[in-house]
Image (tube, grey):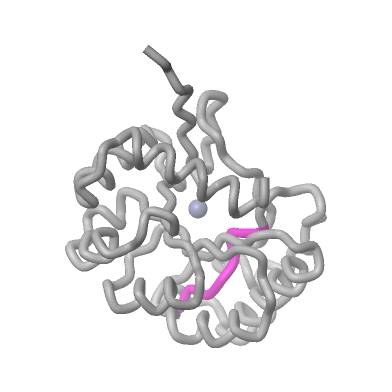
Amino acid sequence: MNEVKQILVDIHTHHPRPDVLSPTMAGIHPWDAECGYALPDFSLCDIIGETGLDYAREVDKTTQERLFRAHLEAAERLQKPVVLHTVRAFEPTIKILTAYNIKGIVFHGFTGSDQQAREALLRGYHLSFGDRSLRSPKTRQAIASTPLDRLFCETDDNASLDIAEIYAEVAKIKSVALAELVKEIYENYKRLFRL
Ligand SMILES: [Zn+2]
């Protein structure tokens, strides 16, 4: 049998594994927007993030937006993709994004509705799904309608979660063979980084 090596991609994890492909990231989380941290050297990472807006947190919105824009400016200048953290701020996030020419945009831990997914997909963005996405009935519907060439899977900060579990569940929702999902996501990864 002709065995093709199946490479799993975890597009956003706080716990990288040697057997799973994960991009390196640098950024200041919107939760830390008021901490006054200096921006990291973005030239050293694969992806800029996580960055974005979180309106569920008690963090000044103007400060969050200023920091978010600083990340987007760097992403535009360095031609690097961005991983977004967006909570209760979908529309303002989209509005800010349209002002920048970013190489690739990934909404991480997407928990939005099918309608929001469609809006993001129309703009050429990618959606990444993790365990919280799978627990949300409205997002399960969004997963079903997200084309295979625009989605990623992730474990985020959950150290006890195996990325293979997310792949298996997403494959089930999309009614595709696991091997096909693995292949498509790897292609998405290569396209995101123009490999
Ligand atoms: Zn995270």
130 or 39, which lies in front?
A: 130
167 or 42, which lies in front?
A: 167
Rendering coords of residue 88 (x, y %): 39, 78
Rendering coords of residue 30 (x, y %): 57, 68
Vertical order, 25 against 73 (above or below): above
The residue sitting at 52% across, 61% down in the picture is 106
Q: Is residue 193 left or right of residue 137?
A: right
Q: Main secondary structure of the magenta part?
A: strand
Rendering coords of residue 34 (x, y %): 65, 73
Vertical order, 185 against 40 (above or below): above
User: In the image, is residue 123 part of the stretch drawn in magenta?
Assistant: no
Which residue, as the protein is rendered here, is positioned at the far top? 1
Rendering coords of residue 76 (x, y %): 74, 70
Vertical order, 4 against 188 (above or below): above
- Quadrant containing the C terminus is top right
Q: Is residue 101 left or right of residue 97?
A: right
User: In the image, is residue 51 part of the stretch drawn in magenta?
Assistant: yes
The residue sitting at 27% across, 64% down in the picture is 145
The residue sitting at 27% across, 72% down in the picture is 114
The residue sitting at 40% across, 42% down in the picture is 158
Q: Number of callouts in the render?
A: 0
- Quadrant containing the N terminus is top left
- The image quadrant of residue 27 is bottom right
- The image quadrant of residue 157 is top left
Please report the bounds of the magenta region as a residue range.
48-55
